[in-house]
Image (tube, rainbow, N blue to C red):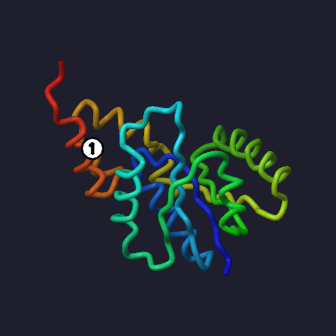
Amino acid sequence: MRLALYAGSFDPVTFGHLDLIQRAAVLFDHVVVAIGRHPTKRPLFTTDERCQLIREVTSGIANVEVAEFEGLSIHYAKSRNAVAMIRGLRAATDFEYELQIAHANADMRPEIDTIFLPTRVERGFVSASLVREIASHRGDVSRYVPAPVAEALARKFAAPRA
């Protein structure tokens, strides 16, 4: 089975992420969407919440699994017998950073390829941080995230401001 790993923080998952998941699911037999747990980061959504949201928005894609991991994504990819790591590219600036990571991963695990998928033009400017910023000001994020994610963001930011 040709398994690909798509790792990230997904805080929150956006339509751009979902597009990459759907496209990877066509290219590979099995896709693991892996949510990294980083003890030094303070995400808006807990790991469990992010897993649940991704499971909900990918429930119609039979060959997608959601998992969580700690440490380096390349080590997790190896533990899952992945043949590839999926990485999305929004702009040229993403490429430099992602290429550096791909080279490091290839140095550690040359048997695992990195596959770069460009985002669709209409999603090229959308990032999880942009979505969080808009949502924090109670802006409409429904154009950028699936409905369950928009609802979860609204709940997160519904508390009265101090």
Q: Quadrant of residue 155?
A: top left
Task: Indicate whether 108 appears above or below 26.
Answer: above
Quadrant where the C terminus sits is top left
Q: Residue at x 75, y 50 (%)?
A: 102
Task: Indicate whether 24 appears above or below 114.
Answer: below
Q: Hey, which residue is sitting farthest left in the picture?
A: 160
Residue 2, image x, y percentages: 68, 77
Q: Residue at x 46, y 49 (%)?
A: 10
Residue 121, image x, y percentages: 51, 54
Whether residue 43 sits left or right of residue 154 in the image: it is: right
Whether residue 49 sits left or right of residue 108 in the image: it is: left
- Residue at the disc numbered 1: 153
- Mark 1, Cα crowd under 10 Å, few <14 / some 14-19 / many 20+, is many
Number of marks in picture: 1
Q: Secondary structure at mark 1?
A: helix
Residue 135, image x, y percentages: 28, 37
- 124 or 14: nearer the viewer: 14
Quadrant where the N terminus sits is bottom right
Task: Indicate whether 122 appears above or below 131.
Answer: below
Whether residue 151 sits left or right of residue 93 in the image: it is: left
Q: Amino acid at mark 1?
A: Leu
Q: Hey, which residue is sitting farthest top in the picture?
A: 162
Task: Indicate whether 6 appears above or below 131.
Answer: below
Residue 106, image x, y percentages: 82, 53
Q: Residue at x 61, y 50 (%)?
A: 89
Q: Residue at x 60, y 56 (%)?
A: 118
- 34 or 116: nearer the viewer: 34
